[in-house]
Amino acid sequence: MRNLWSDSEAKAVVSRHAGEGIGEDLALRAYTARLLGGEPALVLHGGGNTSVKTRADNLWGEAVEVLCIKGSGRDMATIQPDGHPALDLAALRRAASLEALDDAAMVALLRASLLDPEGPSPSVETLLHAFLPHRFVDHTHANAVLSLTNQPDGAALVAEAFGERVAVVPYVMPGFGLAKAARAAYEASPGCHGLVLVKHGIVSFGDSAQESYTRMVELVTLSEARLESGSRKVFAAAPLPAGLAPVAEVGPILRGATAPDDGADGGPPLRFVLAHRGGGRVLDYVAGAEVARYGQAGVATPDHAIRTKPKPLLLPAPEAGKLEAFADAARAAVAAYRDGYLAYLARHGGPDGADAMPRVALVPGLGLFALGATAVEAGIAADIAEAAIEVITDAEAIGTFESITEAETHAIEYWPPERAKLANTADPPLAGRVAVVTGGAGGIGAATAAVFAEAGAEVVLLDRDGEGAERVARELGGLGLACDVTDPAAVRAAYDRACETHGGIDILVSNAGAAWQGRIGEVSNDLLRASFELNFFAHQSMAREAVRIMGAQGGGGVLLFNASKQALNPGPDFGPYGLPKAATLSLMRQYAVDYGRDGIRSNAVNADRIRSGLLTDEMVTARAGARGVSEAEYLAGNLLGREVLADDVARAFLSLALAPATTGAVLTVDGGNIAAAPR
Ligand code: ZN
């Protein structure tokens, strides 16, 4: 492991923070926390914690000894000084004399010791830092250390690798008990540079930020050196079928098999969003003949339990062309997983009603799929599952991976301070749904993607202008793809990307279109056909692929089409545009008729006079001029006397996505144009 400390960078950080009234201790504390946090082999997503003991003013303006400790769940990769709230150190140290301290009392003590009562919740491992005497204390869940300690003879391996440099702390659950055990281990060998927490991680400490950080790097490097002796081929592979089904086809089946409900809340069916990983080490791991042993042995470090659950779901390899059999096997495996998880809860005291779905699935030949309520959560679970695979692979190379016991795992998985890291706000209405929007680079498409993202959906934006789609997607935390929707192969490829990224789709907003004009008796067939390609056949290609994926998932879905008022109320010289749009309106109804039995709803928005995309600024100027009115009067020339915006159309799409009993409907968004009213 490389030592990334830089004198010049440290100096720059100190002087930058000095201007904000932040002292050198805290500035350097945050600096080395970031050095550790930027290395995924040390900590991931809020894991690990760092502290410094220094002085700060209390509410009376008196300088007191404080412990500045990482806020619970804060990401060390980006942490700043304010991510380390200050606690009254004397108050924390008084607790060291107690025999026992229950969780509620510990949490109360931490909060009551905050100098700023509004500060972030301190790390659940605060007392471990407070009870050690060193100014700087660093704690990580370094993969290499876990590969050594998570063995039947882990303590002996640690002693062999580190000698006198560390004191060993047997596994104790995080909290007061671990803080006391760590203190006792340090006192028994006061010359050590750190502590190895068996089956949990490592602590380093020192008088300066640089010393504590450097010791962490040195100790992890020693672990890596010990692991290098285990170079044998780790996992003997089980045979795989000759042809494997692709990730894009397996994702929707897995999403369907793990759907926590059937959409009874009224919206599109709730499903997990998936994240897939298929690197070389992941593939070797999932295809191993003994994956049912090492893959089910438990967590690599207690912190992982809330993200990945104690065990992953094991699935068979999906054979190409035999997806029905795979789907049956997946449903059976999920049912068995749920039964097993509920039995585990029953053995260890609940809680009742806990969600029993897996968070990680291992698929031989394809890799791992992580499941989350959102793409961000799925990504976190996938990163953690990959780290666990690193740990277990290296552990198996030198011995046999062994986790904490089932009872210990349950205790940490349902420990209230740990659960608090997951506490999320109320689910937005489209959380867990994946929406594909065509014509997403601007206008109605971009506005719709924004409204759907705000409602919690994962958005995938397609546009012939791929850079434009990527730009909009970046702002929304979505996926932007270049796609010519008139090319069925490109449409299929775009859906494959969406399924590889998120596991499937729930909503299609088929919006892309363009206005061809001409007096109908005078237009060429080529022009008319070009308009039909985009304004009709592209909608059909998008919808056909969407219902294929929704069918694989089961549980329904939503199709939404951008029709135009031309479909109902043809305007002069707009035949080349209106004719395919009329066909698209019929297409919407045909999907409603043919796919209602599968729970797939199909609806359209009938918008008019939206200044964006199809209605260019030049067209607005020309039409207003032809009518002898101002542009504003032209745009607001409707019953409500109000300009209709792309955002109004976007909100109409959202309302249709959330209308459980509506299919085959046209929703008019034109400010009132009675000649275009559907009935
Ligand atoms: Zn820890």
Image (spheres, helix red, strand yellow):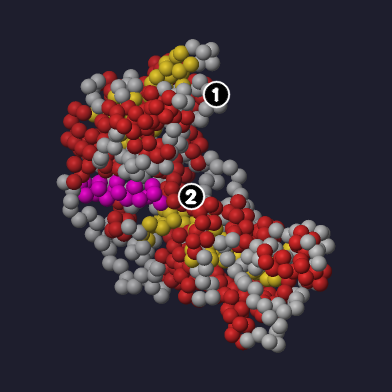
Determine which residue is flagged by label 2. 376
Disc 1: CA contacts within 10 A as few (<14), some (14-19) or many (>=20)? few
Query: Is residue 467 shown left or right of residue 385?
Result: right
- For the N terminus, give its image quadrant: top left
How far across and down, in percent of the image, does residue 282 sit? 32, 56
Looking at the rendered structure, the kind of residue marked 1 is Pro
What predominant SS class does the magenta segment belong to?
Answer: helix
Looking at the rendered structure, the kind of residue marked 2 is Val
Q: Is residue 640 above or below residue 42?
A: below
Q: Is residue 572 above or below residue 338?
A: below
- Kindly tell me whether residue 193 is visible in this rendering: yes
Disc 2: CA contacts within 10 A as few (<14), some (14-19) or many (>=20)? some
The verdict on residue 394 being magenta is yes
How far across and down, in percent of the image, does residue 9 sit? 33, 33
Quarter of the image holding residue 406?
top left
In the rendering, which numbered label is found on residue 117?
1
Mark 2 or mark 1, earlier in chain: 1
Which segment is the magenta one?
Answer: 382-399
